Amino acid sequence: MHIVHAEYVISNPSVDKCPPADKPEFAFIGRSNVGKSSLINMLTGRKQLAKTSATPGKTQMINHFIIRSREQRKAAEWYLVDLPGYGYAKTSQKSRRKWHKMIEDYLRKRTNLVNTFVLIDGRHEPMPIDIDFINQLGEWQLPFALVFTKCDKMKPGGLERNAQLLQNALLQQWETLPPVFRTSATTGLGKDPLLVFVDNARRIWASDAHSL
């Protein structure tokens, strides 16, 4: 898949105010400062599409981007959604509850949501908050994939160790693991596999939608 156009559409504080659910949608979420905006910019080829910031917790709403992609002369449109990061401590409890409610409502009510990419900082051992969020997605029976970010900043042995620690933790409750991707916004690692995954999932969604 080749992305030919990516454009910001709208930011909303509520799933009820999101664009019409008429296109397949792929959401990106992770702990604050996990490199989400940089990864989105790398995938789309637009350096300033998602605003990066040195301040964690900058993303506070549901941000929609319209993506036009092409595969073997066939064009397609889909939404890429940048969600607020979870687990940022330097905000009030009221704000955290508001964000959590907004994220939960979006994930559980957005009917055209095809897949959620959960971003994990590959430089660190898995944190309980990541494992709790992943397990919550399982309880909600929502499709998702794991994306390790900043993989260029780790030696291969350390990265694989952290990945294995996470997988071991998840296998305490999961029989099978979700798809896993390793990425780097700096080197472009993982771009093609992620876009192939999106394109395949998008095609399945379109086929199912037409069969209704």
Image: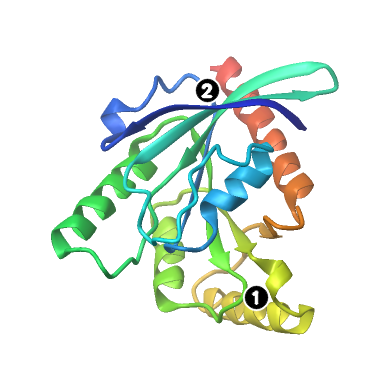
Q: Residue 146, how many percent across, how many down?
A: 59, 59
Q: Answer with left or right where residue 1 lies relative to residue 82.
A: right
Residue at the image point whose x is 78% and y is 45% from the top: 192
In the image, is residue 170 above or below residue 144? below
Few, some or many residues within 10 Å of mark 2 (<14, 14–19, 20+): many
Residue holding disc 1: 163
Q: Amino acid at mark 2?
A: Lys
Few, some or many residues within 10 Å of mark 1 (<14, 14–19, 20+): many
In the image, is residue 104 above or below residue 198? below
Asked if residue 158 shows in the view, the reply is yes
Residue holding disc 2: 23
Residue at the image point whose x is 28% and y is 70% from the top: 89
Q: Mark 2 or mark 1: which comes first in sequence? A: 2
Q: Secondary structure at mark 1?
A: helix
Q: Answer with left or right where residue 68 lies relative to residue 126.
A: right
Q: Residue 145, how many percent across, how many down?
A: 59, 54
Asked if residue 117 shows in the view, the reply is no
